[in-house]
Image (cartoon, rainbow, N blue to C red):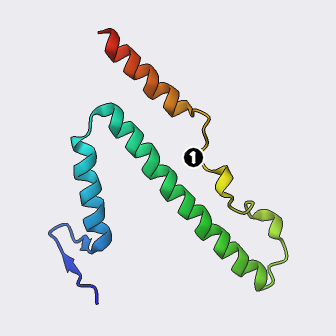
Amino acid sequence: MQKLSTNTSTEIEDDITSFGNHVKSVLRKLHPRLKVQANNEIFNVLTKYEVIEMNMLEERSLSSGISNPSTFMPAYSPSSTASTSEPTNLTVQTQNAAQNEENY
């Protein structure tokens, strides 16, 4: 059973809050370039699972008889995530920042 407690700002203290606080403390200790990369990867992982959840909700809605499925987004595909070998705009920016830092 999960124990919940509240802090002074009335935020519920649970495993998600604890994990968020841990992520926050780790990100604050990272070199700025690594912080950008970590933020990007975390964002991509969260986005992936948000899309999966949306697709699950869509499938439930479609199976319950919604008549206009064209308003939904296409299904999630692992090949559509940012984990391709092609550099993203953020990767290029990070590489450029590293080169600029070396030039100083």
> In the image, is 89 to the left or to the right of 38?
right
Q: Which residue is drawn at 55% across and 31% down?
A: 89
**Image vertical order of residue 83 relative to residue 62, above or below:** above
Q: Position of residue 9 (x, y in %)?
A: 19, 66
Residue lying furthest right: 67
**Image vertical order of residue 8 relative to residue 101, above or below:** below
Q: What residue type is labelled 1?
A: Ser
The picture quadrant where one finds residue 40 is: top left
> In the image, is 74 to the left or to the right of 102?
right
Q: Position of residue 60 (x, y in %)?
A: 70, 81
Residue lying furthest left: 8
Residue lying furthest bottom: 1
The picture quadrant where one finds residue 2 is: bottom left
Label 1 Cα neighbours within 10 Å, binned few <14 / some 14-19 / many ≥20: few
Dividing the image into 4 quarters, which one contains the C terminus?
A: top left
Q: Position of residue 98 (x, y in %)?
A: 38, 22
Q: Where is residue 49 in the image (x, y as percent from the top left)?
A: 54, 63
> In the image, is 12 to the left or to the right of 36?
left
Give the total number of marks visible in the rendering: 1
Residue lying furthest front: 85
Q: Which residue is drawn at 60% across and 38% down?
A: 85
Q: Which residue is drawn at 28% across and 90% down?
A: 1
Q: What element carries label 1?
A: loop
Q: Which residue is drawn at 58% across and 45% down?
A: 82
**Which residue is tagged 1?**
83
**Image vertical order of residue 12 relative to residue 72, above or below:** below
Between 102 and 22, the residue placed more toward the observer is 102
> In the image, is 75 to the left or to the right of 92?
right
